[in-house]
Amino acid sequence: MSRIVVVSNRVPVPSQAARAGGLAVVLQEASDRIGLWFGWSGKTAAETGEDAAVETARGTDYATIGLSEEDHQNFYIGFANSALWPLLHFRLGLIEFRREHLAGYRAVNERFARALVKLLRPDDLIWVHDYHLIPLARALRDLGVANRIGFFLHVPFVPSNVFTALPQADSLLRDFCAFDVVGFQTDEHLDDFRQSVRQILGYAVDVAGVIAAQDRRVRTIVAPVGIDAAKYHRQAERAAGGKNYKRLVDSLAGRNLVIGVDRLDYSKGLPNRFEAFNRLLTRFPEHRLGVSYLQIAVPSREEVAEYASLRHSLSRMAGDINGRHGTFDWVPLRYMSQGLARSTLSGFYRAARIGLVTPFRDGMNLVAHEYLAAQDESDPGMLVLSRFAGAADYFSAALTVNPYDPDEIAEAVHAGLQMSLDERRDRHAKLLEELGRLSAASYCATFLQALTATSP
């Protein structure tokens, strides 16, 4: 059986104390076949070598390379997160394009390729993840790599008339076509990619979704990411007997809990979510003193100006809302900028009557999955979900909202808080059925079957 080589921007090196990210959790389902995981170490240095540092644990080699500060600025902060990220989240006004950033983005991908090629075997299946590494297959092909190479985009794709807002968009689109398989979270993202290939590059796409590129046939698929819901449910049950769960529940003093858990990012719609909570308390005064909203927003990419500005805005909004609605024994909005362990969060989800997942755009959003999996089926909470999250394509029984309308979010939260137990049970049963079809195992199997079936 071929070895799987995973390539991602960051690598979950076992000896490092950092909490495993969503990709690491999802790919645990394929961990018995992952022989090599390659990517950036997360460290910058004045000088960096061409060879990767390798650490082996539980049968997998974890190989990492460092970046220079200039590389990090151009590749990660510059092109990946100041141009591609806003583009792929429909935020054209936030795109900051500089040619030196694009050149640095390509240079880092070429450096990844030069380090990775030394570690490859002839029959390896190479599985590349996310927008940081779109040019990697082309860079590997230029070095003579003939292995099957697949790419999965975890964030949304955009229609062709949006994608062309990015300078040199056509060259980036050609980079996609150096892969053998390209995967997306939803049919919408897949359709937008195919449309871009047709309209921008003029490539034919057949009825099976295979692109006739210049030097290869590229298969395009939908492979939605999921979690091991049963395992997460058991974790939430255990967490409900723990001290952190008890501390949280005791602090609520019988009030209902609304919870949101996100990275601190402008794509998550957090200011609108805060305003929605303000309007809930204003328009539906019956919830005053009866509900608390816990928002966990872990800072990320603070080097990007928009992220630092967002953090200050949310702190100000939280203070205003608590000043307007709070009492001496009730803080309506609890805003945390520190992360919590996944096990602790599972218990907090279980305690929450409402799970708020209202991004402006998201590839999938696994918080929605985790919230649903954590619930007590005998008395479940309700998921309020943005129609623009990839999860909305699959969770039809959730309370779906337009995240740009704070009043609509407030109305959905009100409906969830007022909903009868019978309706909550009925909706949750349908959501669990939908959740069962989305799993980490099915995601890995779907993508790897498609990649294995391609001709090397």
Image (cartoon, helix red, strand yellow):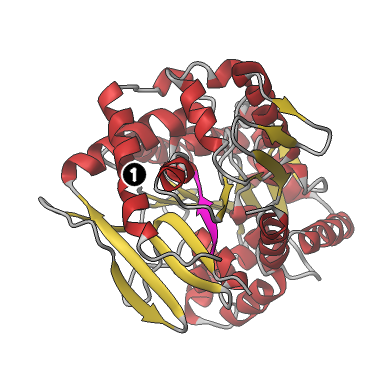
Residue 127: percent from the left, percent from the top?
Answer: 54, 56
| Drawn side of residue 187 relative to residue 42, left or right | right
Residue wearing tag 1? 110
Outermost residue on the front side: it is 144
Dominant secondary structure (helix, strand or loop) of the stretch shown in magenta: strand
Q: Quadrant of the N terminus?
A: bottom right
**Left/right of residue 394 with respect to residue 95 in the rendered view:** right
Residue drawn 81% across the image and 50% down it: 419
Neighbourhood count class around disc 1 (C-alpha, 10 Å): few under 14, some 14–19, many 20 upward: many
Image quadrant where residue 189 sits: top right
Query: What range is drawn magenta here?
Result: 124-130
Return the x and y of residue 314 as percentages of the image width and height: 39, 38
Specify the quadrant of the image occupied by residue 103: top left
Which residue is found at the position 78% from the left and 67% from the top?
A: 379
Q: Quadrant of the C terminus?
A: bottom right
Query: Which amino acid type corresponds to the residue marked 1 in the rendered image?
Result: Glu
| Nearest to the observer: residue 29 or residue 324 | 29
